[in-house]
Image: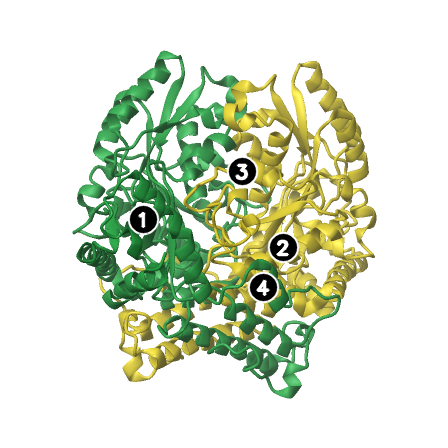
Chain colours: A yellow, B green
Amino acid sequence: MSLNPNGYKLSEKTGKLTAFELLPTTVTAGPETREFLLKVIDVLLDFVKATNDRNEKVLDFHHPEDMKRLLDLDIPDRAVNLQQLIEDCATTLKYQVKTGHPHFFNQLSCGLDIISMAGEWLTATANTNMFTYEIAPVFILMENVVLSKMREIIGWQGGDSILAPGGSISNLYAFLAARHKMFPDYKEHGAAGLPGQLVMFTSDQCHYSIKSCASVCGLGTENCVMVPSDERGRMITTELERLIMQRKAKGHIPFFVNATAGTTVLGAFDNLNEIADICQKYNCWMHVDAAWGGGLLLSRRHRHPRFTGVERADSVTWNPHKLMGALLQCSTIHFKEDGLLISCNQMSAEYLFMTDKQYDISYDTGDKVIQCGRHNDIFKLWLQWRSKGTDGFERQQDRLMDLAQYQVRRIHEQSDRFHLIMEPECVNVSFWYIPKRLRGVPHDANKEKELGKICPIIKGRMMQKGSLMVGYQPDDRRPNFFRSIISSAAVTEADVDYMLDEIHRLGDDL
Amino acid sequence: MSLNPNGYKLSEKTGKLTAFELLPTTVTAGPETREFLLKVIDVLLDFVKATNDRNEKVLDFHHPEDMKRLLDLDIPDRAVNLQQLIEDCATTLKYQVKTGHPHFFNQLSCGLDIISMAGEWLTATANTNMFTYEIAPVFILMENVVLSKMREIIGWQGGDSILAPGGSISNLYAFLAARHKMFPDYKEHGAAGLPGQLVMFTSDQCHYSIKSCASVCGLGTENCVMVPSDERGRMITTELERLIMQRKAKGHIPFFVNATAGTTVLGAFDNLNEIADICQKYNCWMHVDAAWGGGLLLSRRHRHPRFTGVERADSVTWNPHKLMGALLQCSTIHFKEDGLLISCNQMSAEYLFMTDKQYDISYDTGDKVIQCGRHNDIFKLWLQWRSKGTDGFERQQDRLMDLAQYQVRRIHEQSDRFHLIMEPECVNVSFWYIPKRLRGVPHDANKEKELGKICPIIKGRMMQKGSLMVGYQPDDRRPNFFRSIISSAAVTEADVDYMLDEIHRLGDDL
């Protein structure tokens, strides 16, 4: 085992010190501080090595009650010493899931980009807040550069953007800006001042944060209309129009349509041009939730037809921490119109955003957001983008898509063992594993039910063994099925073969 | 200058590589990956050293347009090499404000806690999301331990908590839970289903995120009633009661009162027991925004009377990234009643929160929050708490308060040069600097106006010189004044003297 919690020894003298005997409280402790931090880095570098070692387990699973017995999580009254803190770090990583392991296909965010990680280390050390140029000058300018570039890639000139703590909050920003743009009095008067019930629309395959906006912001979830999707998971746009008309007939006010570019489970892309036409016709704000699929905007090969029409949207969510592999978290929200973020969200706190500062305060971003403090999520992305170049990022997106296509081919070639649910539009591959006893049995609803039952069992086995992580879930049309994700730059064709072979090893007897 | 961007040389061979020639895409590149990461650490350790060196500048200020010329922020089409990335890191830190420098008194979050920083490095390397036990087992258990401890310190048994991306979002969670508890139909039916206009109350000194809740969630800011505060910045509770009755008389529904424990500018503490009595009488949810003052809950010496009655609140926001010095960001929100977070926020996404998992899913937290992905903000706090112990944390809080009292004494001793605005309740010290020409002039409104005018000039000079960072702002009673913050463990009495002396050096001639 590579991470032996007892394998990282500080010098005896330093090991016995406590945090109070390091910088900053003990000013002479530069050397001991350095020794401690370098030892932490030893632990981290070993974890990076283990993450990239295919002979290492993906995880060392224990049930919560067992895990509590294995760990000393206690918060003591008295300080533990530095040697103990080093062991704490090593123990923590020993039992942590290696989300960057080439056999981790479990989440939309997989992988451990080395440059982005280095960027996040620096971000921690810089430890600043993003609300003003005054205390984050370089990072604020980096945000401007990177976000402008992303808007340019979307197909806009001008506009405005912000980084948010995750795609759900990005989607919330879009909702708030849309409401503010269409009903500027809402900020002051609230729902009471509206001419009628606001209604929003999204497909039944959308991310649940869209529905959450309706709950948080006073519409109520019954006024977030779920538009049916086709068998590929794409919004049925004729249904969208029918449902808009239905609500209008009730006197409601349709004002916001969410199109998903890369659904969470199936990786489906709604037809943006058709949705844009409908939004134009019914005067609705068009938001594109490309949190997941956004990375493909960088790919000339895959951008069309998936993103055709995206430039017609009013707002776009795009999470670099997903397909682009930036470290968690890194989510962006973009607006075609400049000025909305500030006019929607500003509360003009005089103590923070004074207008008599000695520099150009148009660089202060704090009054654009509903957070006050904002984590620095830009440096890791900026550095990573420099490290690949836009061309390199494009190649990486194309490579992930190639690997998903390879997986599809391999599933077809092993059609006795695997059942592909649909040809994917993204790197999500949805499939069933067919155990020995069900091979050759005609595929019908009863068989699907049986195939669904074995997913949690195979998942449980892979976690116990620690050999693989692949997700499963049911959807509205079918029972449990596997959905693998290839968003890690570590994955190769051999790893894809390993995934399928390992599922077969774990499930053949079921 | 300690951070010379050209001073960090990789070996010639490694320096010419690009990110694609490191792990994970080049599996044989373990040694080069290690060399690169260790060089980044060299840069970071030098920054830590410079941050703790009182002979170093706090910042190297340049106006935005000049800064753009000094930096190469471009995102190129082609990858830059590893040597360039190292220089990028060093250049970024060269121009970054040292928020951990002992002469940085500018924000509520100051300081660079070494252990918390090490924790954040590990968090980056672990790169996981906090929504399920499946992918963050150790971190989820840590959250349970730390958050339970914090609720215990508040004075509750049981209850529930979550970490949020900043105090503003924590306050939003409180608002949402309150509304859900009192109007459970709201989630589904929205504002339309309510018996009347909801109204919330807070003091006019509160953090602007409280008002933002009213704007975001459909009340409108006019239904966030600003209760006047006394000359010390504390809510006038008789006014609170009068305003509640006034709104009730209009047929409105008062439902939420925010008490601030540590206001942003003055550091004032509202009287919690008086507010709790009123909340009880009028059936309002009582929220305590202790984002800033929360750390003093740990201090037996300072907890009372500031927090007397806090256990009567329904929810409490408490940001360890402020007085406790955890790295940004680390904000917590606590609820007396268990079960509200999940019932309020869950959207039950089947693909993430399946009920047929092979482990106890009560540990999955993702469905409690309006975010989906959630950054791991617990490890840095857990490790830091272990490193100090609860006793050590208490000593640190007491020490910060002692230093603020020292500053007050020194201001009194130099009353020709400095005018203390009020005896502080927290580590915020509000004062004017009196330049030579105004010494001996009787203190009146005209003099205050003059004193206010020189704040931005002194601030501009300290930034240009890079010798000090102290904030200033106006409030509703007075023009600009300085507000220094001592929340960094690096600060000593000598640094406090330096602050006052340096302001004198910068402003004597004004």
Q: What amino acid type should be assigned to the residue bearing mark 2?
A: Asn
Q: Residue B202: image x %, image y %?
A: 35, 31
Q: Is residue B39 left or right of residue A182?
A: left
Instruction: Using the numbered discs, state the Cα–Cα distance from disc 3 to disc 1 in whole angstroms.
Output: 33 Å
Same subunit, labels 3 and 4: the answer reads: no
Q: Chain of mark 1?
A: B
Q: What amino acid type should be assigned to the residue bearing mark 3?
A: Asn
Q: What amino acid type should be assigned to the residue bearing mark 1?
A: Ser
Same subunit, labels 2 and 4: the answer reads: no
Which residue was labeled with disc 1? B148
Kindly indicate whether the residue at mark 1 contacts the one at mark 3 (C-beta within 8 angstroms).
no
Instruction: Using the numbered discs, state the Cα–Cα distance from disc 1 to disc 4 in whole angstroms.
Output: 46 Å
Provide the secondary structure element on which disc 3 rests: helix
Provide the secondary structure element on which disc 1 rests: helix
Which residue was labeled with disc 4? B67
Provide the secondary structure element on which disc 4 rests: helix
Quarter of the image with the C terminus of chain A is: bottom right
Does label 2 or label 3 sit earlier along the sequence? 2
The circle on residue B289 is: none
Which residue was labeled with disc 2? A144
Which residue was labeled with disc 3? A345
Q: Chain of mark 3?
A: A
Kindly indicate whether the residue at mark 4 contacts the one at mark 2 (C-beta within 8 angstroms).
no
Nearer to us of marks 3 and 1 is 3
